[in-house]
Amino acid sequence: RKEVEQDPGPFNVPEGATVAFNCTYSNSASQSFFWYRQDCRKEPKLLMSVYSSGNEDGRFTAQLNRASQYISLLIRDSKLSDSATYLCVVRGSNYQLIWGAGTKLIIKP
Amino acid sequence: SAVISQKPSRDICQRGTSLTIQCQVDSQVTMMFWYRQQPGQSLTLIATANQGSEATYESGFVIDKFPISRPNLTFSTLTVSNMSPEDSSIYLCSSMDTQRNEQFFGPGTRLTVL
């Protein structure tokens, strides 16, 4: 079993819709969680950290469920510019990040 | 966030040659990392670049193939030695802001080995 698993997609979503993806992790001792966004042929960029209480940044909401060992990302009112690959990232007790393979999102007009 | 630059941005190399990639951060950072990303794949950590000491390599990566230097807190190099077509990939430099617990990336170096 992979340490961090994501549905690779692609998720094809009409503009304006709400889309959500989950990511599961295997190490219950994981301490920090992040969502990164990677555009085609670009480097990953931090989208948001995921806090235990959940957090929201504009149209984006991240949730953490420690009991079931998954994190989620919800995007409301999706824009064409949201098309990208979304990478789930988990950090353990050291500083090493474990990366998911990414979920590809395509927003269609 | 730290601003990270890499040189070269891309290169096409012949089999058997070596390429050194440079990474410059605009501020002093404690931790720097080198990753590889194959087309359509996620990131794979090659090594942690330690300032003033030998890099810490992940399983499957060795110093002879990927020598790393880190002479100070803002600069690191990764060399891809004796290249083969299997080394074709994007190589990404990264630094960590330990106070904010966030990691940032350079723009990457796209390497093609013929």
Image (spheres, helix red, strand yellow):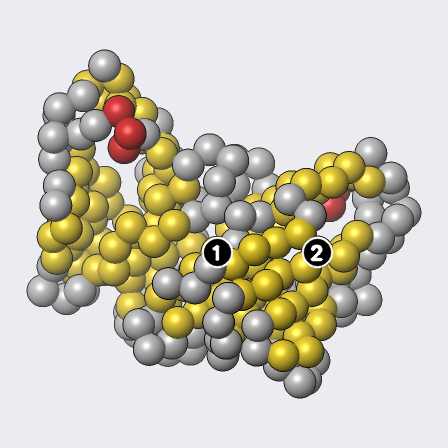
Please say if A69 is above or below B109. Answer: below
Work out whether residue B88 or residue A42 is closer to the camera in this orientation and state it: A42
Residue denoted by label 1? B105
Please say if A98 is above or below B63. Answer: above
Q: Amino acid at mark 1?
A: Phe
Residue denoted by label 2? B21
* Mark 1 surroundings within 10 Å by alpha-carbon count, few (fewer than 14), some (14 through 19), many (20 or more): many
Residue at coordinates 53% horizontally, 65% vertically from top-left? B25
* Mark 2 surroundings within 10 Å by alpha-carbon count, few (fewer than 14), some (14 through 19), many (20 or more): many
Q: Earlier in the sequence, mark 1 or mark 2?
A: 2
Instruction: Residue B73: give x, y in percent of width and height.
Output: 57, 78
Instruction: Residue A86: give x, y in percent of width and height.
Output: 34, 42
Give the CA distance from mark 1 to mark 2.
14 Å
Instruction: Residue B64: give x, y in percent of width and height.
Output: 81, 66
Q: In the figure, residue B97 lies in which quadrant?
A: bottom left
In-image side of B14 versus B47 (left or right): right
Residue at coordinates 17% horizontally, 64% vertically from top-left? A51
Secondary-structure class at tag 1: strand
Which chain does the residue under circle 2 lie in?
A: B
Which chain does the residue under circle 1 lie in?
A: B
Please say if B102 is above or below A34. Answer: below
Q: Amino acid at mark 2?
A: Ile
For this orientation, the residue located farthest to the bottom is B52
Residue B112 appears anywhere in the view: yes
